[in-house]
Amino acid sequence: MPTVTIMPSGKTVEAAEGATLLQIIMSSGEEINHKCEGKAECGSCHIFVHEGRKGISKVAREENERLDSIVGVGSKSRLACQAKILGTENIKVELLGFSSGF
Ligand code: FES
């Protein structure tokens, strides 16, 4: 099973196919905002995906529109609640803390 490494702590957990990055990060015990409970409406679960971007689902229109409205978005940006594990490769993400999103 592929893994997700969560920066800055460096914690590595197993990544079940079909799970979202939000679910995986939450079950790892790390803190991540998720104010709209995974509906791509709040942007508070904004993270950077540094490695393994081919191992998660592509950005859909709702996620793209929400990302467009967030300050500090870059080419590595994803909404953790919208990115699903495809199970093909290991992934490394960076939590951005409470300064990101809304
Ligand atoms: S939890 Fe609101 S956009 Fe992801």
Image (cartoon, grey):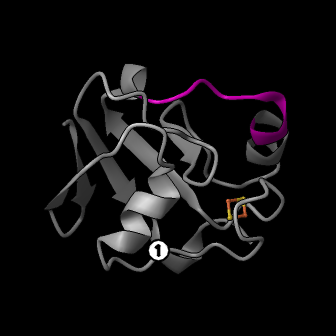
Residue 9, position as x, y percentages in the image: 18, 70
Magenta stretch mostly in which secondary structure? loop
Q: Where does the N terminus fall, quadrant-wise?
A: top left
Q: Label 1 amino acid?
A: Gly
Can you say whether 34 is above or below 12 in the image? below
* Secondary structure at numbered mark 1: helix
Query: In the picture, which quadrant includes the C terminus?
Result: bottom right
Q: Is residue 79 left or right of residue 2?
A: right
Residue name at image x 61 percent, y 52 percent = 72
Q: Which residue is mark 1?
A: 97
Relative vertical location of residue 42 with respect to residue 4 in this rendering, above or below: below
Residue situated in front as seen by the camera: 8 or 12: 12
Coordinates of residue 87 in the picture (x, y in percent): 33, 29
In the displayed structure image, the side of residue 74 where residue 7 appears, left or right? left
The answer to whether residue 85 is above or below residue 6 is above
Q: Is residue 31 magenta?
A: no
**Residue drawn at point x = 75 percent, y = 40 percent:** 63
Q: Is residue 29 above or below residue 47?
A: below
- Residue at coordinates 55% horizontally, 27% vertically from top-left? 57
Q: Position of residue 55 (x, y in %)?
A: 37, 25
User: Is 58 colored magenta in this rendering?
Assistant: yes
What number of labels is visible? 1
| Residue 81 shown left or right of residue 53 in the figure | right
Boundaries of the magenta span? 56-63
Ligand 1 falls in quadrant: bottom right
Residue at 66% across, 67% down: 44
